[in-house]
Image (cartoon, rainbow, N blue to C red):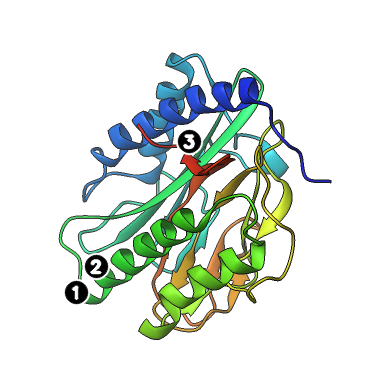
Amino acid sequence: MIPIKIPEEIALMREGGRMLAQIMEELKKEVRPGVTTKALDQSAERKIREAGAKPAFKNYNGFPASICTSVNEEVVHAIPSLEKILQAGDILTLDIGLIWKGYYLDMARTVPVGEISPDAARLLRVAWKALKVGTKKVRPGVTIGDLGNTIERAIGPVGYGIVRELCGHGIGKELHEEPQIPNYGERHAGETLKEGMVICIEPMITLGGWQVQLAKDGQTFVTKDGSLSAHFEDTIAVIENGYEALTHI
């Protein structure tokens, strides 16, 4: 069963989404060589709580932190640590969620740490474009297959790996709701998007193969071949004439 939100619920999620987007912008400015991922986690949690919200990820399925800080070959769900010190040339995915008045919001951005390689910079540009192209496809009547196919076609010709074992999802009173939103698909296949659905679109791509594996910490997914990975995500509402990106300022 895919939950449908009434306008009052989407209004609350819009409030939380704008709050989360502002926190993300502030946190991105703190990313620099020499900073630990634990320091970024502490800063994010402080900002979330000062805004009157709650961290969405803390203690979720045993996750011990408020944000995910995935570096280089880490795709998603990396645990912040005092031992993980950012180095110039790294790429870092900040994945942040909060709970606002009973509703979850979720977003991610992959950012450079200092000056990065041309290959890494291109990876970030393609992943960002895939999110934008996928978002613009959203409207009532479009299928999940249509959406995944649009994202896939934005990435495939470049030759990057499209992670298949992880995907986007519905969101609302729970962090993960139906439907699942893969970053690939067949046109006209799958569930049809309807007004009132709220989903997270989140392309995850790699410089190498698409296969991932779970690290020893039981939380972090990494690329199997050790290649760089980028991940962008927004919470998107399906509205009467198209879409609204809720995690934007």
Please, what secondary structure does the residue beneath circle 2 have? helix
Q: Residue at x 47, y 51 (%)?
A: 233
Q: Residue at x 36, y 60 (%)?
A: 128
Frontmost residue, 119 versus 7: 7
The type of residue carrying mark 3 is Leu
The type of residue carrying mark 2 is Ala
Frontmost residue, 113 versus 85: 113
Q: Quarter holding the C terminus? A: top left
Q: Could you say which quadrant of the image residue 238 lies in? A: top right
Check if mark 1's residue and mark 3's residue have beta carbons within 8 Å. Answer: no
Which residue is outermost to the front? Answer: 241
Frontmost residue, 182 versus 57: 182
Residue 104: image location, x then y, percent: 61, 32
Disc 1 to disc 3, C-alpha distance? 31 Å
**First in sequence: mark 2 or mark 3?**
2
Disc 2 to disc 3, C-alpha distance? 26 Å
Q: How many marks?
A: 3
Which residue is outermost to the left? Answer: 115
Frontmost residue, 96 versus 136: 136
Q: Residue at x 50, y 44 (%)?
A: 243
> Circle 1 is placed at which residue position?
118
> Circle 3 is placed at which residue position?
246
Which residue is outermost to the right? Answer: 1
Q: Residues within 10 Å of mark 1 (few under 14, many from 20)?
A: few
Residue 223: image location, x then y, percent: 51, 74
Q: Is residue 169 left or right of residue 32?
A: right
Q: Residue at x 71, y 57 (%)?
A: 192
Residue 93: image location, x then y, percent: 40, 53
Please, what secondary structure does the residue beneath circle 3 have? loop
Q: Residues within 10 Å of mark 3 (few under 14, many from 20)?
A: many
